[in-house]
Amino acid sequence: MEIDGRGSDRVAPSRRRLVAIMFTDMVGYSALAQADESSALSLLERHNQLLRPLFSRFSGREIKTVGDAFLVEFESALDAVRCALELQRSLHDYNAASADGGKIRIRIGIHVGDVVEVDGDLLGDAVNIASRIEPLADPEGISLTQQAHDQVQNKISIRFAKLPPVSLKNIRLPMSVYRVVMPWSSERADRVGPREVGGLNLAVLPLSNISPDPNDEYFADGLTEELITQLSHVQDLTVIARTSVIPYKLAPKSIAQVGSELGVDTILEGSVRKSGQRIRITLQLIDVDSQRHIWASSYDRDIGDVFAVQTDIAERTAGALRLELSKTRRPRLARKPTADPVAYDLYLRGLVAASEPDEKVIPEAVRYFEEATRLDPTFAEAFAAWANLYVMAAGDFLPMRDAMPKARALVARALELDPGSSDAHAALANIVLQFDNDWGLAETEFEKAISLNPSNAVAYRFFSLLLIVLERFDEAKEMCRRAIRLDPGRDSLQGTLAWAELESGNFDAAFAYAEKARDNQPASIGSHAMLGMFYLAAGRRSDAVREADTPLVGANDTERFDHALLNALVGRPEAARSVAAEVERGEAKSYTSASHLAMLYAALGETSRALDLLEQDYREGDRILWLYHRGVFFDPIREDPRFVALLRRYGLTVRSIRGSKVPTT
């Protein structure tokens, strides 16, 4: 559909203003309207309901709607692009949960230029240009002119693909137009200089262990993680986190399947053979689309030369993809983390043990890191990994008051040895977030960790939680999406994104994400419990009851807790009372914080006991209410002055949630 800018030249120049214009159009609507007018009108109404709230969220002003098209004005190109991204992401997730006939796909065009307003309508070439570049976008895509691109290219973390110059109707000169490369798109972003193969997104598949001793499996797994870290030093290369590639070790798939599932266009795969102090590493870098080998090489070295091998791999990958090693991170490739091969071997064993989400392996990982740093007290990477082990265990497997002071001492040593360690800064950010509740310093440290390693998925993941606490929901969603891009196999990230959508009032998107997380892991009690609590927050009790009916088959202690909590919230208290009694008697098999126990008591209506436990947690130093205080399970005590006082002691914003009335004193 085209918007006519007639008459703009006849309006006095003083009435002109410079704005960003967005034009949206629904894909396939005209054909649907001809085939089934009733269904088309129903879909159009849903389309309007989904889009309109997002315009105002980004300070957009709806000028008019013509059929299935919107014309929207923004004060800046940045607001317009951010709104467009949110529109497409929300619809993409909505479509993932919709039947074929109910999917809504739109194209978006954005331009910056002069307009004039006449009787509430906008006129001028800027309007025409936005409407005429919209068809150049893919379905679920965004196109923008050079003028809009120049205002946002260094202010937002998205990639663009430049199109050949295009001639537009009634526009004298050809225009430069860009497409936004969407996360789900297979299109590659343009770069300076030719690049015939490869791409900007890389996965390092788990190296195969072909050593004579099968117990050397840890070496292949640890080296895989080290290569992921080293390749993150290649500028503009997105490297998928280990947690998302490790499943392919037990269930190998074709290069095409891996590329599709992880959203990557380049894959590094190979094997390692360790025999005594000798290693043989064989690798090949493969372009997903063409299946061509970009490069392949074998390394026969002493184990002490493994760092030189890693450096060579990063340099060869960068060169082959026409990328550069980051100038700020290049020196890190040249440094040798340790001169002690035994310490390095122990470090790799520690990395592999620490990657297991099981409290039983924590003592084993600690022993490896402790011995590695004893052999080499200057081994910064080992100190940082040890610190992160405690950070990840705190609150879930170990009391915060026990784990965090140990983590603080370790991260201080790591930063003393290597101030440029992204992992150490991420650990420090988590310590000051979770243990000190210093929101400002936590944000500074997360930003530092990300600047040092833009592929640090852990930093993005926890930064998103901080931004939710600070009620900066749009930023939280962006951080979480970046984490998902780097670690697409971590299903809990879908839950975090769903939570951010829920807290920002975007219930449809929240349910789409949470339902996707549940459907990806239908046997996971936790995903059913989370979705059930989201339904309760939105007032959908019958849907919450359905999730609470999920049978407890092969559930661990955490899943039993989640199941009991949801059932208590829908009026079935028996399981919650049983779990609470086990914890109170000290019979629980795993660690349960006082704040988690308080959730059960609040859901059971035993508000005084719940408040006692929350105050105990704060007093003793566990202090995890910051993360959970918005949960529906605390609604029964939300207006209690003791609860409000606790939030203020944490430095949290105290305001009405789900209709509660916050006491003024």
Image (cartoon, helix red, strand yellow):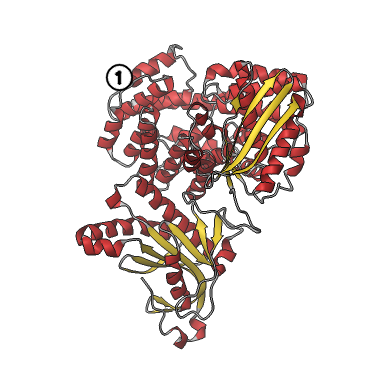
Circle 1 Cα neighbour tier, 10 Å, few/some/many (<14 / 14–19 / ≥20):
few
Q: Indicate the quadrant where residue 549 lies.
A: top left
Q: Circle 1 sits on which residue?
A: 574
Q: Where, quadrant-wise, is the N terminus in this rendering?
A: bottom left
Camera-nearest residue between 634 and 183: 183
On the image, the x and y values in percent for residue 190 come to: 58, 58
From the viewer's perspective, tell me whether residue 509 is left or right of residue 413: left
- Residue pushed farthest right? 339
Residue 298 x %, y %:
69, 33
Specify whether residue 407 is in view.
Answer: no
Query: Up-down: is 185 above or below 286?
Result: below
Q: Nearer the viewer, residue 345 or 530?
A: 345
Task: Say left or right for 483 vs 610.
Answer: right
Number of marks present in the image shown: 1
In the image, residue 39 sits, relative to residue 490, either above or below, namely: below
Q: Residue at 70% x, 21% y: name it.
A: 345
Identity, as a three-letter code, of the amino acid under mark 1 = Glu
Residue sitting at x 45%, y 65%: 136
Which residue occupies 71% across, 31% down?
Answer: 299
Residue 312 lies, in percent from the top left, at: 73, 38
Residue 138 seen in the current view: yes
Q: Quadrant of residue 270?
A: top right
Name the secondary structure under disc 1.
helix
